[in-house]
Amino acid sequence: MCGIAGELRFDGAAPERETIERMNALLTRRGPDGEGFWSSGPVAFGHRRLAIIDLSERSRQPMVDAAAGLALVFNGTIYNYPELRHELITRGHSFFSDGDTEVILRAYAEWGEACVERLTGMFAFAIWDMQRQQLFLARDRIGIKPLYFARTTKFLRFASNTQALLAAGGIDTHLDPVALHHQFMLHASVPAPFTVLKGIRKLEQGTTLTIDAAGRTFERRYWTLTAQRPAVAKREAEWTEAIHDALRHAVKTHLDIADVKVGVLLSGGLDSSLLVALLAEQGVPDLMTFSVGFEDAPEERGNEFEYSDAVADHFATRHHKYAIPNSEVLKRLPEAVCAMAEPMVSQDAVSFYLLAEQVSRTVKVVQSGQGADEVFAGYSWHAKMAAESGPTVPYIERLQRHYFDRDHAEFAEMLLAKYQVGDVTSELLAAKLAEPFADTFIDQLLRAEATLLITDDPVKRVDNMTMAWGLEARVPFLDHPLVELAAQMPPELKLGSGGKHVLKTIARGLLPDSVIDRPKGYFPMPALKYVRGEFLDFMRDILDSSACRQRGVYRRAYVDKLLAEPEKHLTRIQGSKLWHLALLEFWLQRNVDSAR
């Protein structure tokens, strides 16, 4: 797990070492254990290392094999690398290291660009092929690991976050109207290739990009998700057993493939609690768990310690819990925003940032339950949309009614004319739902979440907030073989029991019933939902600042309406619309304005 950066020149010039150093400096928190540089002709790589597998210098990066004519920078973890290593040895390859980095290098040497189809794990990497004079970029199927790039007529630069690209300079920082529409419709989920900045794009999940020294480009999607029933029908018990086995395997590999201690982020919800149960089931000794909580609001509790404590007690884990006061949240919030590669409005983002700080003092790797709700239909909107059956309700209207943060008309009311676009978010999601090889609307919906929406909410925030502290977060529920299996399962086995039926069936007998049958929970931070007091003052100051007014994004009448009654204006999934506006502006001030 690391931070990567690089540059490929198209103009005959050599990349400047200083440029790569500036990018690397903005990746230090992702990789606090060391750095490396490499250059040859038109290309240069930079790397920041977080040592998790093969802690020796043999696995340092950039990794170069002059004989094979290959150089690599890699961020992520390949969970099936021992098997691939063995296969490559049988094919005549020899290894000088014991980690997963060299396996990618040898896999490319053996199978070329098709190597990605053999990798199980989370990854973003770049390979310079010296013989072909080509740069090969790849991102994992779900997009767990980020890969941003900026391209001009003179160069292509890539990095693990936008801050590194901004530090390199030469970026068009004008706001992208299409991305802004996604930002405000999909609770800050901006699907690839867009970001809110016109000059920065991101490689789509499950995709590779090949660029040669002349700038010729070829993009290939190497993974698609089929959401259809198998030819041979399975009974519920067979599905349950298959999902249980696949989840066991994912949890085990996400534990075993590390040369350091692995803990669990325990929210007290079903998903993280089930991870603890499966690890305990496999006899993991000295299991460490971590929970965070915040101050209550009159409308909502700020922690779920009663559930996380119950799970920790049940399995006798070495449990750590942290209660963080609102004063600390507000003081530290600017740091969390500076750690966001893109503006993220979820309360979870700040929660994860503050929790990761504490956890990183004890372990370097944690398992987290993100992805279970999207893959196994755990959210309230899944049941609401499923209930609206019949051909008279178009699929996209269901999504608009229960998932979108606001109507298109409100977007027009909110932003000034230069940022107005058509309803591009509805067009994107309607096209995604209409893709072939999905049997029902719920199959289409869950596939869209797993292959488009989940990458930027919640996957991106988990990566950003944990890696800000040099902490690797692993997400077993997004192991792609498990995602593929779940996509074939009948929707009723997900929607049943109030959502995540199959997971609740697996958990029964492993976890206390109180945890299985509790209402849906999350990492709550009421202060960012029920905006009042000093949090309201903070957001008012941002939106009334000269920087915000000069930027000219928001219509002042809309801003004033939200400021007058902030708790009245919530999204359909109960997010603060005022926070949405303030967060984007604050992110721009902290990350873009400061880089100029």
Image (spheres, grey):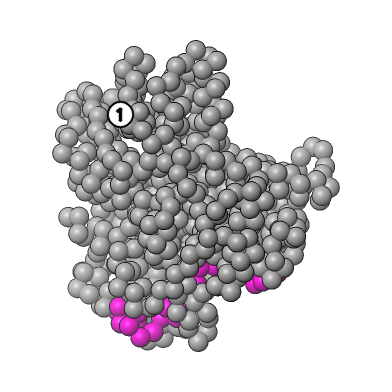
Secondary structure category for the residue under label 1: loop
Q: Residue at x 30, y 60 (%)?
A: 338
Does 107 appear above or below 515? above
Q: Residue at x 44, y 73 (%)?
A: 323
Q: Residue at x 16, y 34 (%)?
A: 16
Horizontally, residue 424 falls left or right of residue 496, namely left
Q: Residue at x 50, y 53 (%)?
A: 263
| Crowd around label 1: few <14 · some 14–19 · many ≥20 (10 Å) | many
Horizontally, residue 201 falls left or right of residue 287, namely left
Locate residue 566, reporting x and y percent: 41, 82
For disc 1, the marked residue is 215
Q: Amino acid at mark 1?
A: Gly
Residue 246, picture quadrant: top right
Does 465 appear above or below 143? below
State which region is magenta. Answer: 517-540
The quadrant of the picture occupied by the N terminus is top left
Does 293 appear above or below 463? below
Say if the magenta span includes residue 293: no
